[in-house]
Image (spheres, helix red, strand yellow):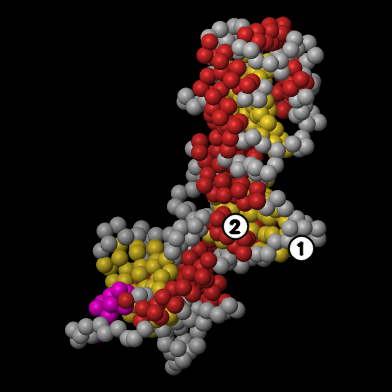
């Protein structure tokens, strides 16, 4: 800082738990003939030597005439990183040399990264300082002209600075916020280190660090990146590879926005390395990760090498020193992530054997057979887009969950799609009507249903549901050997080898159910849909429909 510039620092130190005022006073920068020392550093030295106790909990408020320079910001950040029992709020009257090329801008950003609260002084703060730190002889505070206008100007500049990506993280910040603890309390910030490369020459185009913003409006780190990325000029003829190293996995709202962003930017491919899983035991957060996976995002838990890579790219050139149990925590969270992503993408062999069994009676040991729905979404040319498995949960039928899942993808109306569903039970009347309404609302989408068993097929209302589906151009067929084999290959986490019927009389039960379905459809005057089923297209690996189908 320019030695000719005087900085005054007014401070208050309170005990956090009861807000009791412990000390207040004023420092200014020290000049010759004494050793030059900035006001912020004089305060830190005094606070550390006279008041700070490891067992205490402190709330510090500073009112400074000039914002901290880059060196003072570094020292304040290091102090806060080493004393987690201290929170600090800094009010600044003016911003000190914060032009585009000034390192002071980066200093302000790293202060925020270490949870310091940085604000511009407005009238109320000036009035508070006047009453508590100025020898005013009982005179009222007389604001100078343009006080509010100047404060708004400085605040606008400050908010723009804090929205900018940081170039690097402090070592202390990285060690605290990227530690891959299974349960990490007190780490309320998300840091996202990113690198954008052009695929054809692997050239790095953009690189930086963003964090979640609190003021003037809340914005998660992922959305902050998307906002910054939108501001860059992308060439539609180029392909871009984006890599994230993120301290917390995305929440469900951010996951939805990321999927939308990638859907609108087909030339962008995203890989995410995650330090910790955020609320991984909550169902909604699991669904967020599954949506990211289905949206084409490559996700990995950060292993030792990933931490080293992130350290060298975004922290410093020093050697990364891993913390204890890093590998143990990685193995735990990596296993958890795989379980989350596999839960709806694949079925266990035993689940398939019990739930898709098309025998009239459930096999021993007796277990309730509920509705499972495996689906595959393809473009009209057969290119696969996504697939998954859903089941009925807490009265929310699998068909309803499927409709919600497809609707959330915002499929373009100008393109045709094909969805094939494999159900353990045929739809109930309510779900049949929902599927009919869904099909009518999405005329560009071709929907086809295969079912392992017929649900209450002797009841009139259930027969009406099947008839209603077929009349709405939603073909319903009974699964045969080819369809079971297709499900086994595409939706079951099975041992290597060709498909062998997991239960006896699979084809016998299938042929009986096919005859029964044909009787139901004919009794309601539904046209023969044989040609529709024979024209079924599921891409290169699709199962042929059995020629023994009596329809």
Mark 2 secondary-structure assignment: helix
Q: CA distance from mark 1 to mark 2?
A: 20 Å
Quadrant occupied by the C terminus? top right
Residue 34 shows in this picture: yes
Residue at 57% across / 60% down in the picture?
227
State which mark lies toward you, 1 or 2.
2
> Which residue lies under the disc numbered 2?
226
Residue 343 shows in this picture: no
The residue furthest bottom is: 33
Query: Image height check: is 454 above or below 47?
Result: above
Choose between 108 and 480: the one closer to the eye. 480
Query: Image height check: is 468 above or below 400?
Result: above
Choose between 136 and 125: the one closer to the eye. 125
**Magenta part of the chain:** 124-135
Pointer 1 local density, CA inside 10 Å: few below 14, some 14–19, many at least 20: few
Residue at 49% across / 57% down in the picture?
219
Q: Position of residue 469 (x, y in %)?
A: 61, 22
CB within 8 Å, label 1 to label 2: no
Mark 1 secondary-structure assignment: strand
Residue at 78% across / 15% down in the picture?
546
Tell me the chief SS of the magenta region: helix
> Which disc, if any, is residue 212?
none
Say which label, 1 or 2, has the lower sequence index.
1
Pointer 2 local density, CA inside 10 Å: few below 14, some 14–19, many at least 20: few
> Which residue lies under the disc numbered 1?
203
Asked if the stretch drawn in magenta spans residue 125, the answer is yes
Q: Position of residue 358 (x, y in %)?
A: 65, 11
User: In the displayed structure, does residue 190 sit left or right of residue 144?
Assistant: right
Q: Position of residue 87 (x, y in %)?
A: 39, 63
Residue at 68% across / 53% down in the picture?
265
């Amino acid at each position: 800082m320019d030695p000719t510039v005087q900085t005054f620092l007014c401070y208050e130190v309170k005990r956090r738990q009861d807000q009791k005022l412990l000390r207040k006073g004023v420092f200014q920068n020290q000049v010759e003939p004494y050793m030059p020392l900035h006001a912020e550093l004089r305060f830190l030295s005094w606070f550390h030597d006279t008041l700070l106790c490891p067992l205490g909990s402190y709330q510090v408020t500073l009112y400074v005439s000039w914002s901290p320079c880059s060196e003072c910001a570094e020292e304040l950040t290091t102090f806060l990183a080493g004393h987690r029992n201290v929170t600090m709020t800094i009010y600044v009257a003016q911003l000190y040399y914060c032009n585009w090329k000034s390192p002071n801008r980066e200093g302000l950003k790293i202060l925020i990264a270490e949870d310091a609260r940085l604000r511009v002084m407005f009238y109320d703060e000036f009035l508070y300082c006047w009453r508590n730190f100025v020898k005013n002889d009982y005179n009222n505070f007389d604001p100078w002209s343009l006080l509010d206008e100047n404060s708004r100007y400085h605040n606008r500049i400050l908010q723009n600075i804090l929205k900018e990506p940081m170039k690097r993280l402090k070592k202390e910040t990285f060690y605290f916020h990227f530690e891959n603890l299974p349960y990490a309390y007190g780490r309320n910030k998300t840091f996202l280190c990113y690198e954008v490369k052009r695929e054809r020459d692997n050239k790095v185009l953009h690189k930086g660090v963003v964090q979640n913003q609190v003021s003037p409006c809340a914005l998660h780190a992922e959305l902050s990146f998307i906002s910054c990325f939108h501001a860059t000029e992308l060439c539609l003829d180029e392909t871009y590879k984006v890599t994230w190293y993120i301290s917390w996995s995305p929440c469900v709202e951010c996951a939805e926005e990321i999927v939308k962003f990638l859907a609108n930017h087909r030339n962008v491919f995203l890989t995410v390395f995650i330090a910790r899983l955020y609320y991984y035991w909550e169902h909604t957060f699991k669904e967020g990760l599954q949506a990211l996976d289905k949206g084409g995002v490559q996700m990995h838990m950060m292993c030792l090498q990933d931490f080293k890579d992130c350290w060298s790219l975004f922290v410093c050139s020093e050697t990364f020193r891993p913390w204890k149990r890093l590998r143990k925590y990685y193995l735990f969270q990596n296993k958890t992530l795989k379980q989350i992503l596999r839960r709806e993408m694949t079925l266990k062999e035993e689940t398939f054997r019990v739930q898709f069994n098309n025998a009239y009676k459930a096999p021993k040991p007796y277990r309730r057979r509920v509705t499972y729905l495996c689906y595959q979404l393809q473009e009209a040319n057969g290119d696969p887009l996504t697939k998954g498995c859903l089941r009925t949960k807490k009265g929310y039928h699998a068909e309803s969950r499927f409709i919600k899942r497809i609707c959330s993808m915002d499929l373009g109306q100008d393109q045709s799609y094909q969805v094939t569903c494999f159900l353990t039970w045929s739809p109930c009347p309510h779900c049949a009507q929902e599927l009919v309404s869904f099909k009518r609302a999405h005329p560009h989408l071709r929907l086809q249903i295969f079912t392992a068993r017929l649900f209450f097929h002797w009841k009139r209302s259930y027969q009406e549901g099947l008839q209603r589906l077929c009349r709405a151009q939603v073909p319903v067929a009974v699964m045969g050997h080819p369809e079971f084999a297709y499900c086994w290959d595409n939706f079951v986490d099975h041992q290597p080898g060709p498909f062998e019927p997991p239960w006896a009389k699979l084809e016998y039960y299938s042929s009986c159910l096919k005859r029964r379905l044909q009787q139901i459809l004919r009794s309601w005057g539904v046209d023969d849909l044989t040609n529709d089923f024979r024209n079924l297209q599921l891409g290169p690996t699709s199962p042929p429909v059995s020629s023994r189908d009596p329809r």
